[in-house]
Amino acid sequence: MTNTSVCFFLNGEKNTYTGNPSARLLDVLRGEYKLTGTKCGCKEGECGACSVIIDSKLHNSCLVAMGSINGSSVITIEGYSDTARFTVLDKAYASVSAVQCGFCIPGMILASECLLKTNPKPTEAEIREGISGNLCRCTGYNSIVKAIGIASGDADTELNISHVPDKPSMSLEEALILRKNTELIPYAGGTDLMVPENCHKKEYLFIGNIPELKQITQDDEYIRFGAACTFTEVINHELSPELLKEACRQIAAPAIRNAGTVGGNIGNGSAKADSALIFMVTDSKLRIMNADGERIIPLKDFYLGNKQLNISDDELIVEILMPKTCLDNYYYKKVGARNALSISRTSFAGILDIQNGIIKNFATAFGAVIDTIIRYEHIDKMFIGKTVNEARELKAEYLAKYDEEIVPRRGRVSVEYRKNVCMNLLNDFLTVMSI
Ligand code: FES
Ligand code: FES
C-alpha cells in the first residue's frame, strides 16, 4: 500500500497524516493521536460509539478512510469538550442521570450536537431519530432523550472550533485516467467498502469530492443525480422526488446517510440497496464513463447477477438519470429489524400514474428477495393502458403471476417469510391504490 499525505483539521488544528490512505480514521485517532474518547464498538457503522463530526456532519469514524478526509475538519469529543456548547449538553445529561458506564456517551454527545445544530427545537421523535445510530447498552434511551430535550433550550452558542473545509478535489477527467491506468477501487462514502468483510487489499480512488459527481440537476427529460451525492444531500435537495427522499431517510441513521452515496448504493451491486430500488422502479438510467467516452444504459441492464455488474474496471458511474414522470402516487415499505439498521430484510416500491382514467404507468420493484432487485416489467405491463376497473378484474391473475415468479433465496430470514412479506406488500400496494 502506497503511503500518502493527508492534510486535515483535527479539533481546529492543522494536521498532516502520512500513512496508509485506506486506514480507518477511528484507528488513527485512537492509535496515532491518542484520542481515545472515540470508542470502537462494532467497526460496521451500527453502534455509533466511534462518532465524530466531519465538516459539521456526524460520521462513523470506523467507516472513514484517511484518504477521504483531505481538507476536512474533524472534531472528536476531546475537541468538542472544550466548547461552551459541550457544557450545555454535559449539564443536561448529568441533570437526568443519562450516563452509566459512559461508553456510548461521546458518540451520543456528538450526535446530540449535530441534531441540535440543524434542529434547535426537536420533537421527541426527532431526538430519537437523531440518535438512532447510537446504541446504549446500559442507561436506556429515555433519560438521554430527556437530556437532549433539556439542552435544546440552551444550545445556540457558536461552536468555536468549526472550520470551513477547503477540500482539494481531482477532476472527473483525472479520475477516469487513473481508473484506466491503475487498479484503484472507487470510494465515495465508504459505508460498504470499510465494513471489515468487504475491505479490499487494493487501494482506493477517492471520488467523493469530484464536483461533477456532486450535482443534482435536471433537463427536459430527467432529474440527474451525481453518483457521489450522499443520501443526506438527496434528501435536502428540492429536485429529489418524495419517493426517493423517503427511501433515503429510511436507509439508516444520520451518520450513514451523511456518508453513503446513491452511486455507491448501485455500484456495490446489492439487492438490498434502498435508493437503487427507487431508481429501478422509476426505470432510471445510468450514465457511465471511461477515459474514452460514455454510455447510457437502463439500470435494470446494469445488474447481471449476484454482484455481477455491467461495468468495466476502467469505468465510473457518473450520474443516475431519473425520468421526470409523475411520481406523486407511490408506495414504499422497508421491512427491517431496526429502523437505523442499514440492511433491509425485504423492501418494496410501487408507482401508479393514471391519466384521463387510464393507467399510464404502473411499476413495482422488490429489494432483498433474490440476488438482484426484482423488476418484473412483463407482469406490471398487464395493467398499463387499462382503467382501474379493468385492472381490478385482472388483479387475481396479476397476483398469481407474481406468486409464481418470486422465488426468494434464503438469507437472514427464511424463504417462506420473504415470500409472504413480498405478497403482502404487493397486495397492500394494490389495495392502497384502490385496485
Ligand atoms: Fe460501531 Fe463505528 S465502531 S459504528
Ligand atoms: Fe453505558 Fe450507554 S451508558 S453504553
Image: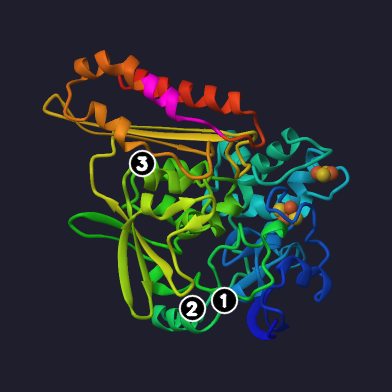
Q: What is the residue that sits farthest to the left in this orientation?
A: 356
Q: Is residue 41 above or below residue 187?
A: above
Quarter where residue 354 is shown: top left
Ligand 1, by image quadrant, is: bottom right
CA gap, disc 1 to disc 2?
7 Å
Q: Which residues are magenta?
A: 399-408
Please say whether residue 402 is one of the residues in the magenta stretch: yes
Q: Which residue is mark 3?
A: 281
Which amino acid lies under the numbered mark 3 shown in the image of this protein?
Val
Q: Is residue 117 above or below residue 139?
A: below
Q: Which residue is mark 2?
A: 179
Q: Position of residue 255 (x, y in %)?
A: 61, 54
Circle 2: element type:
helix
Q: Is there any visible trace of residue 64 in the rendered image? A: yes
The residue shown at (56%, 59%) is 259
Locate the C terminus and report the quarter of the image it occupies. top left
The residue shown at (55%, 75%) is 205
Locate the N terminus and report the quarter of the image it occupies. bottom right
CA gap, disc 3 to disc 2?
30 Å
Total residue callouts: 3
Circle 3: element type:
helix
CA gap, disc 3 to disc 1?
31 Å
The residue shown at (37%, 71%) is 289
Neighbourhood count class around disc 1 (C-alpha, 10 Å): few under 14, some 14–19, many 20 upward: some
Q: Which residue is mark 1?
A: 184
Q: Position of residue 258 (x, y in %)?
A: 55, 57
Q: Nearer the viewer, residue 158 or 31?
A: 31
Which amino acid lies under the numbered mark 2 shown in the image of this protein?
Arg
Upstream in sequence: badge 1 or badge 2: 2
Is residue 137 shown left or right of residue 86? right
